[in-house]
Amino acid sequence: MSDHLPSDPLDSQLARTLREEYRRAITEAKKELDNAPLVVRHGAVRSGYRVPLGALVGLSILVIVIPLLGRSLLSPTGGLGTAASLGTTAAPPRNPNASLPLGAPTSIDGHAVVSSFAAIDVLANSSDDSSIYVIGWLLPSSVHSCPVVRGSTTWNPCFALHLFPEPTVGLWALSIFGAPSARDIPIAPDGFATPLVLMVHTHDPSCVDASCIHLAVVEMAAWGGRPEAISNESASSAPPSGLMQVDAVAAAIAAAPNGVVRSLSLVSAKAGTYGLVGPGGSDVDSDRWVWAVLLTGQFRAPDCGADGNTACVSGPGEELVVLDYGTGEFLLGVRSTP
Amino acid sequence: MRHVRLDQSNVVRSDAHPLVGYDDVVALAPDLLAAARYLLKDDAEARDLVQTTLEIGIRKIDQLRDPSRLRPWLFAIETREAFRLRRRLTRYLAARPSVGTLASSDHHEDTFVVRDAVSRLPVRMQGAVVLHHLVGLTVSETAAAMGITQNTAMK
């Protein structure tokens, strides 16, 4: 049987016209998607991990990302523009070592094994590409969702692994980026988390600017323990009905007043009372629970139209987006440029 | 235990298809969106359809037996999801006829005419026309995507 329909000249002409129109439609679609990328959940997202979001359905984005960009919301000296750190957390684990698996090594080849939480400072203070051993729990669906990005880059947070301090989908995880030389990383079956010691390094040769110099790049899995069933209990002390971090980040990106045009990175996403995590000088109640999401990237210039023209792209900058913890309601955005 | 590998472009790829990754799937987004606009009248629904298609595609990439068939495989997913969505929308559209209007202000006029014409076809015929004549799938691929026989697809 022929795989193409028989046609007379008139049909052929019509078919050509249709194809031409379709090519035009593809071009149009490509242009639109370049300006307004779709959002695609990436990885095995299980319904049990989702928080009902109502108005945010369809906007759910990104990943739990923890790039180090020279500022910390976890640092004791805290706040934007202060000490370097790697973390993003709603509430750090009460006891970072509480959920280390039995039999986990405390050192490998003479190097101490640090928890994913403790690794924040170790990575931030690293000065070369020496190997660092980090222990944590890798969940099969720890990459939750991701925007359709234009091309892939080594530092694309969409493809990072996320090492959790406990065998649960908590609000905090350490992002581990990939490397060409990385060996296979074991992933547990759905419903289970794998305890792993990952050998990582910073100062990766493929990092060409300061934004990625302290990011953890995986070399190999140095140790793997027995997978455990994923718990739904989180160590967070945050109110139980709030947005998960991934959804807060999604909402923040969607709510960024002028939109991120390119080079999006998440510096941090922290939940807490506004007085702790929010910027000063606003009338938001200091006791109100909020998500403070700090993004970097190139944003659309304030006086620019929506056509994505290159001239409309401002220089690199940061935007702190503050959302209501429970509803994701946009409260305020603060733009700054280096 | 499953394994993933982080390759040079840092894309998580499955062992089953080392040649097909996330980028390969999302690269077809414009193609899928163009077709979605012929399958569904509402532009927002079309974007949602592509989003859903890409999500399913990425999640089920291991089920793709022949990596060279990625495009027809994704269009098969999209078509099935479109039909499913249309069935759901039918009841809604009956109550909210305005939902079905085509967002055409920034579209080429001829494209609008073609879309309008295609949208007036019966649903199944519409799918076959879009997949075969617009997307360029073969008859067998079109039939497979729609879950019908080749003979039916050719009618």
Image (cartoon, helix red, strand yellow):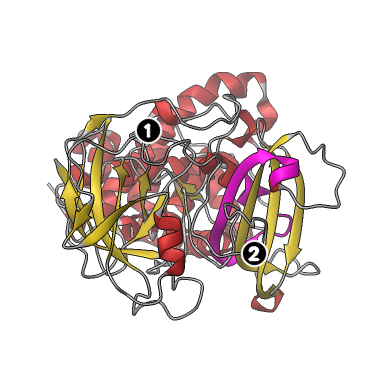
Q: Quadrant of residue B1?
A: top left
In the rendered structure, the answer to whether residue A220 lies left or right of residue A231 reads left
Q: Which residues are magenta?
A: A251-276
Q: Is residue A226 above or below residue A70?
A: above
| Residue type beneath disc 1 | Thr
Find residue A323 and report its horizontal and vertical position in percent.
Answer: 69, 42
Instruction: Answer whether residue A175 is magenta in the image.
Output: no
Q: Callout 1: few (<14), some (14-19), or many (20+) C-alpha neighbours within 10 Å?
A: many
Circle 1 SS class: loop
| Residue type beneath disc 2 | Thr
Residue A109 seen by the camera: yes
| Along the viewing direction, whichever of A216 and A317 lies nearer the viewer | A216
| Along the viewing direction, whichever of A218 and B138 lies nearer the viewer | A218
In the rendered structure, the answer to whether residue A92 lies left or right of residue A272 reads left
**Is the C terminus of chain A in the top left, top right, bottom left or bottom right quadrant?**
bottom right
The residue depicted at 32 percent of the width and 75 percent of the height is: A129
Q: Chain of mark 2?
A: A
| Along the viewing direction, whichever of B55 and A278 lies nearer the viewer | A278
Give me the disc on residue A82: 2
Give me the disc on residue A198: none
Q: Is residue B50 above or below residue A86?
A: above
The residue depicted at 17 percent of the width and 59 percent of the height is: B18
Q: Is residue A231 above or below residue A249?
A: above
Q: Chain of mark 1?
A: A
The residue depicted at 50 percent of the width and 65 percent of the height is: A27
The reply to whether callout 1 and callout 2 are in contact (CB within 8 Å) is no
The residue depicted at 65 percent of the width and 30 percent of the height is: A326
Mark 1 and mark 2: Cα distance apart in space: 30 Å
Q: Would you name the residue on which mark 1 appears?
A: A168
Whichever of callouts 1 and 2 sits on the residue coming sooner in the sequence is 2
